[in-house]
Amino acid sequence: MPTAARLKVLAIAYACNPNRGSEEGVGWGWVRAIASRHEVDVITAEFHRDDIERARTAGDESLRRVRFHYVPERSWHYRPNRIWTFIENTPLKPMMNLAYSGWQVDAYRLACRLRADIPFDLVHLITYVGFRFPGRFWRMDIPLVWGPIGGLENTSWRFLPLMGPAGAFYYGGRNVYNSLQILFLPGPRRSFAKASGSIIAATEGIRREIRRRYGRQSEIICEIGPPSEIAEIPIAREPREPLRLVWSGQHQPGKALPLLLRALARLDRSVDWRLTVLGVGRRTVSWKWLARRLGIGERCSWPGWIPRDKAVGEMMRSHVMVITSLKDLTSTVLLEALAAGLPVVCPDSCGFSNVITADCGIKLPVESPGRFIAGLADALRRLAADENERRRLAAGALRRIRDFSWEGKAAAIDGIYRKAVK
């Protein structure tokens, strides 16, 4: 096959939407990256139809070689509305998994019908990125590419007490449930076997787990891409200006904001700082109470949920992004921070390990809560005292963000496809 030949790709992307972030943004970005080099038929959820068709009508050139097929919505299919979002964050989450599996069954049937009419070269399962439910696409008579894959890593047991009783119960239960699924679910094993040589891991930690648990090699491609807005130069911190910190995320136990609050409480009063906490959630009230109890409430602001453009504006006015999440792949806010020219202080785990280097941020070992808090306090103390170092890291952030371009992902995906069809 000529090197430049375009392949016919069948992409499975339940989550795929041009107007949303998180998993929907992942699906949309990957479809566009694939379409830059190949012809793509996408199977996705019906409730994305209106947003996708509006984007197509707007004349997005990247969609010229894409055809979308929508799985008809059924009452038992999962969709991220208020009811299902509530269920997802409770012990009833297995109901959501079953509902998503129901959607996959219908998606597989649609894929087989399309395959009967179109000579696809391969099928690529993109979203959801979790390993648990690869569906039945391993049964198709064409090569399977699977990824980016996440969800294989457990939350550190040592950090569960910091999440409160409900958070500790949820994430502890998830660890047990996750481990049992890795051991006993047949679908992932069959899919890893079929996709062997064409497996994409979202992070280095996921790659290690795939090798350890399933004996398969994989390639790492970060699941998210950079935002469209990239700062030209990083913001400078003026003399006697406080160090402006920003934290962003859903206010739920796994995001672990108390680690940052306790670290800030350790700083001497001579260290001048201000913290902006973006986002809302069920832990907002208790986190505000903790900040007051630690004596740092007056230095913290809580804008709540604000539109994305205003949230990015808050980042652009800040000097350092702090991430404390203990359960993530590569959060969108991480690349948004680099694009804003912000040094990032974060755990040396999850997707943060792959993205942050010594030239754009500070990674802290996740060994115990006490050591992490002490390391975080020390890192912030150093950045507050050394503006030259902070500016060096800020400049490095703007260089680093360019390593995660969608063009680069498209080239990497193309290489995987070429190997798969051989």
Image (cartoon, grey):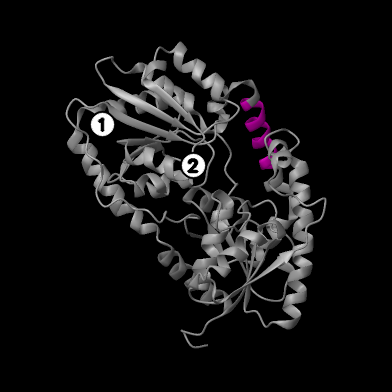
Question: Residue drawn 78% across and 49% down?
Answer: 99
Question: Residue drawn 27% across and 25% down?
Answer: 381
Question: Residue drawn 34% across and 58% down?
Answer: 402
Q: Where is residue 34 in the image (x, y as percent from the top left)?
A: 52, 70
Please identify the dominant SS of the magenta region. Answer: helix
Task: Provide the secondary structure element on which disc 2 rests.
Answer: loop
Q: Can residue 197 be seen in this view?
A: no
Q: In this view, does 113 lie to the left or right of 51?
A: right
Q: Which mark is residue 383?
A: 1
Q: What residue type is labelled 2?
A: Pro
Q: Which residue lies furthest to the right in this view?
A: 75
Q: For residue 187, which quarter of the picture?
A: bottom right
Residue at mark 2 = 307
Q: What residue type is labelled 1?
A: Leu
In the rendered image, residue 313 lying in the magenta stretch gets the answer: no
Question: Residue drawn 53% across and 27% down?
Answer: 159
Q: Is residue 113 visible?
A: yes
Task: Provide the secondary structure element on which disc 1 rests.
Answer: helix
Mark in the foreground, 2 or 1: 2
Q: Where is residue 255 in the image (x, y as percent from the top left)?
A: 52, 33
Q: In this view, does 18 lie to the left or right of 119?
A: left
Counting every numbered tag in the picture gives 2
Q: Is residue 103 left or right of residue 34?
A: right
Range drawn in magenta: 167-179
